Image (cartoon, rainbow, N blue to C red):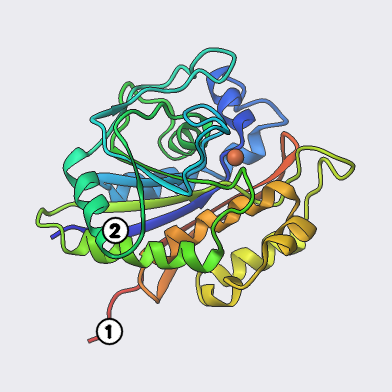
Amino acid sequence: MAEVVAGVGTSHVPAIGAAIDHGKTGDPYWKPLFVGYERAREWIAEVKPDVVILVYNDHASAFSLEVIPTFAIGVAAEFPPADEGYGPRPVPMVTGHPDLAWYLTESLILDEFDMTICNVLPVDHGLTVPLSIMFGQPEAWPVRVIPLAVNVIQYPPPTGQRCYRLGQAIARAVASYDEDLKVAIFGTGGMSHQLQGERAGLVNPEFDGHFLDRLGPDPESLLSISHADYIRKAGTEGIELVMWFIMRGALAPDVVEVHRHYHVAASNTAAGLIAYENAPTRS
Ligand SMILES: [Fe+2]
């Protein structure tokens, strides 16, 4: 049977992708950020997932403001890197897992999560930067990927509670899929950041630290943070953190934190990464 075995929460800052693509990861500005990713890369290479369910938000690359799905799932065989204005990132084609993606779609919709089904889905930095953070610059990505896009651009985004429950539904669906597959789930976006307005550049390490401390042992204590409080405390784009609850909800109630990295600043944001495995079950 398939199983969700690991989860990663990570920022998906576009400048991190640009630093990788332009060979700047050893520059004094970027080095401390990338050194902190090394252990996470070693770990994911050991976990060796077959499939990553990658929760991210599209930044007007696949969807415009004309059509805004709250939750969308990619069921295609391939997802091309999107052109975000400077041409597509020089990263490999993202290979999907249509069988599992369709199975998840059916399970989730029948479990009352109304997913938008995407047969065509160009994927932007929201999805490709986390792949680069975790897997570097391979010729081909070493995993198949099921993109799961969440609206955090247009008010109202889904609540943290709803995202957590979607994660739980994903875990149920994966566990009933009749093929031996190791599945990892990435929740991306965040941490605190604000890109525009008078508070542009806002970073709140205290908020981010509390979030990272609670997400593993007591995620439910974070689910009631309101959209207004994310904006107040974590900046207008801090709302992206709700996507981490889909990852956390898909893991077991007890998890082991295997890696954590927090760095300010990456471009004009705080960058965080946290990695979990399900805790061994007690017999
Ligand atoms: Fe984003």
Q: Residue at x 57, y 71 (%)?
A: 223
Q: Residue furthest left?
A: 178
Q: Which mark is residue 108?
A: 2
Q: Which mark is residue 282?
A: 1
Residue 195 in the image, given as x and y percentages of width and height: 76, 38
Q: Is residue 60 left or right of residue 42?
A: right
Q: Residues within 10 Å of mark 1 (few under 14, many from 20)?
A: few
Task: Give the amino acid at mark 1.
Answer: Arg
Residue 230 in the image, given as x and y percentages of width and height: 71, 59
Q: Residue furthest right?
A: 198
Q: Residues within 10 Å of mark 2 (few under 14, many from 20)?
A: some
Viewer-nearest residue: 45 or 64: 64
Please tell me whether mark 2 sits on a helix, a strand or a loop: helix
Q: Quadrant of residue 210?
A: bottom right
Q: Say whether marks 2 and 1 touch (CB < 8 Å).
A: no
Please tell me in which quarter of the rendered image ligand 1 is found. Answer: top right
Q: Residue furthest bottom?
A: 283
Q: Residue at x 31, y 39 (%)?
A: 145
Q: Which mark is residue 36?
A: none
Residue 110 in the image, given as x and y percentages of width and height: 25, 61
Please tell me whether mark 1 sits on a helix, a strand or a loop: loop
Pointer 2 or 1: first along the chain: 2
Task: Give the amino acid at mark 2.
Answer: Leu
**Residue 277 visible (yes or no):** no
Viewer-nearest residue: 17 or 149: 149
Q: Quadrant of residue 92?
A: top left
Residue 138's place in the image compared with 34, above or below, is above
